[in-house]
Amino acid sequence: MADSQPSDTTQLLRDWAKGNQAALDRLTPRVYRELRRVAGHFMRNENPGRTMQATALVHEAYLKLIEVDNVDWQHRAHFFAVAAQIMRHILLDAARKRASAKRGGNTPRVNLDEIPDMGAERGSQLIALDDALTRLSKLDERKGRVVELRFFGGLSVEETAAVLHVSQETVMRDWKLARAWLLSELNS
């Protein structure tokens, strides 16, 4: 990602951002498998009776991604970070609707030691985690982004560092501190 020559995927992203429809047509099959992986990461341990499948999540996110304008794609990890953020919001919106309809909006605590395997109550726990993450982001935006990219986006330490333009050591330090802060926040 630090190469002076952009990858084929990065070049396609940049061409698509400039309005080249053929670039989007060539890009789609290249990124679909990775988008499915990210969606699978989100959907892991969902309730068996869930209404949304990973494929539907990818398709809904894809529709939102192709509507995104004026993005200067830095590299493929930047694209997947944006895609993960979109998927996160799609799932959070669905979880909030379910929680308000079924439980009157009550959200249980989340044990951060169980992350990323949050179990059957994932929807309500996801809402609690998102609320805590929003508070963390207000205190330290970068730590919030690290959690978002690593947990919600499934990005590696290297990819997260590239997206945030920081060292891998900084990502790991932020990840550890953010997890400790979130654990404290969610258990208080």
Image (spheres, grey):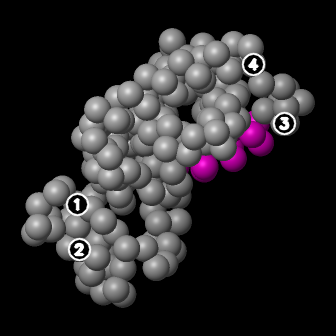
Q: Residue at x 60, y 23 (%)?
A: 182
Per the image, label 2 sits on a secondary structure element best described as: helix
Name the residue that disc number 3 marks.
Answer: 100
- What's the mark number on residue 30? 1
Write down the region rendered in magenta.
87-98
Name the residue that disc number 4 marks.
Answer: 108
**In this image, 78 relative to 186: left or right?**
left
Residue 28 can be seen in this image: no
Q: Amino acid at mark 3?
A: Ser
Q: Position of residue 149 (x, y in %)?
A: 43, 42
Name the residue that disc number 2 marks.
Answer: 12
Q: CA distance from mark 4 to mark 3?
A: 13 Å
Q: Mark 1 or mark 4, which has the lower sequence index?
A: 1
Q: Nearer the viewer, residue 63 or 73?
A: 73
Q: CA distance from mark 1 to mark 2?
A: 10 Å
Residue most toward the right? 104
Placement of the C terminus among the 4 image quadrants: top right
Placement of the N terminus among the 4 image quadrants: bottom left
Q: Amino acid at mark 4?
A: Pro
